[in-house]
Image (cartoon, coloured by chain):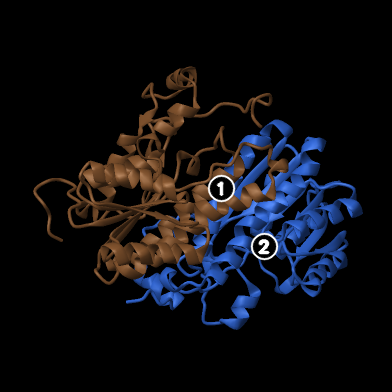
Amino acid sequence: MAEERWLEGMVALVTGAGRGEDGGGGAGIARHLARRGARIAVNDISEEFAQATVEQIRQRGGDAIAVVGDVSNPVDADRIVDETVRHYGRIDILVNNAAISGLIPAVERLPDEIWHHQLAVDLDGPFYMSRAALRYMIPQRFGRIVNISSFAAVRTGFVGGVTYTTAKTGLLGLTRQLAYEVAQYGITVNALMPTGLLNPRVLRLRPDWVQGEGPYRAIHPEEELGWIVAYLCHPSMTAISGAAIPVDRGVSNGIGDFAELKRRSGKDTGE
Amino acid sequence: MTMSSRPCDLGGLVALVTGAGGGSNGGLGAVIARELARAGAQIAVHDVVAEAAEVTASELRQLGFVAEAFSADITDSREADRLVGQVIERFGKIDILVNNAEYRSAAYRPDQIPTEEWQRSVALNVHAPFYLSRAAVRDMRTRKFGRIVNVSNIAAIRASILHGVPYVTTKEALYGFTRHLATEVAQHGITVNAILPGFVVTPELRAQWPEERFERLAPTIPARRAGTAEEIASLVVYLASREAGYLTGAAIPIDGAVSIVPGGRTDPENAFV
């Protein structure tokens, strides 16, 4: 069945989208947007990782380039967007997906370096990238920004730690205020809050992490997360902006189980 | 926890309030410091400007309260550590931390926000509360008691007309920090909450805004008026009290119901500086 290519003619920049088949949400989103007809600028901090996704998209008949750089550096962020526009002539879609997560120490033992680096990538990065992209989107009176937050933005990312929760919550503020300010230019800004995203690399490293089955199965990066991003980027989709959309099959709204979270994360909370 | 017969008696507790300078001409922090003192706490008054901190501290002492001025650039993690160390050296401990100091960015069009404006907002509104909370928790957990109150803003749940992207993002990030820290330190008898004030009249703002600006604002608020700094401070006093031990991780709007009313369109003419 031929897929509907409602993103034909559009250019999408996806950050943290490297590693191709082995990649996480970013690579999945990039592949899906390519299937819908968008030309893709694949950003990653590593050239090798970015190229893996670019090759994968090209092999499937899509059009993609690598734009390597560190989103937490404002000079890099400007350059990543400028390179995208220099190559493709425009930028219509920005997906702020690049982020650092993972187990970190409890707050009272958290060193400055982890806090600063993670906040820079997870929160400063989306701001620098959005600011750079809006310089093109505002004059063309069209744009779609999708921020990949996390369910941690409304609960706690207990596994990830304080920096992840802080950054992902802040990202909702960025989403809401940007949406409010750029609505007048035909630009929408939304946030997705996935939890339990299928990650092939994590599954290989930690085969003991059962990621759920049947109705509780993990969220598929390309088929599911990518589909939602493509839907929000539809040229007619102007009504939804400033939204924070949980992507969790509805199961994360139960009351939390602290003991279970502690057991699964192996986190030392300093008892 | 022993309870006094007087509600919200903070007797025997030590409070550090950041951005609390200016005394009776100051902002929200100075009023919070005064109300915590009236409830019985000993007050460490912080301000980045030493003289401003001293104004508040000496006013409090004249009222018969125990207060000491401290000055530090709390966006620097070593200075934040040093500040908490000095407070503990002077008062023996720290029970209450009110992260009130904030940077209010101007409302630039989002593609024109200077990097420095963003970085200042993140540094004072997100990094500083982290540095100070980290240092304070190390002391609080030894006594199995602590109260951290983060002064966020209704910008954490709505959009802001006055302050733009850096302010809204960092005030919501502060709420995320609040939630996460609350889960980690609850076991130590430490609570962490965020308050979300709406429009608040402070002596500082009275001096900056012409009267007609308050008059124009009033009808937009269901309560038909801006809040007083004392009303905000009374919530801080409650959250800091021994009674409030099971209230944690919350973000409490205190705004005359203005955040419940739906907002309107952005006015392209007046939206940005």
Q: Which chain is blue?
A: A
Residue in the foreground of this view, choosing between B115 and B198: B115
In the displayed structure, A259 sits above or below A95; it is below
Can the viewer see residue B152? Answer: yes
Amino acid at dot 1: Thr
User: On the image, numbered disc 2 is attached to which residue?
Assistant: A98
In the displayed structure, B80 sits above or below B264; it is below
Q: What residue is drawn where x is 70% and y is 70%?
A: A23
* For residue A22, side relative to residue B22 (left or right): right
Q: Quadrant of the N terminus of chain B?
A: bottom left
At label 2, counting other C-alpha atoms closer than 10 Å, the crowd grade (few under 14, some 14-19, many 20 or more) is: many
- Which marked residue is nearer to the observer: mark 1 or mark 2? 1
Q: Residue A60's x, y, as percent?
A: 85, 65
Q: What residue is drawn where x is 70% and y is 49%?
A: A130
Residue in the foreground of this view, choosing between A162 and B166: B166
* For residue A9, side relative to residue B172 (left or right): right
In the displayed structure, A138 sits above or below A196; it is above
Total marks placed: 2
What shade has chain B been given?
brown
At label 1, counting other C-alpha atoms closer than 10 Å, the crowd grade (few under 14, some 14-19, many 20 or more) is: many
Q: Residue B204's x, y, as percent?
A: 44, 33
Task: Check if mark 1 and mark 2 are on a common chain.
Answer: no
In the displayed structure, A32 sits above or below A161; it is above
User: On the image, numbered disc 1 is attached to which residue?
Assistant: B169
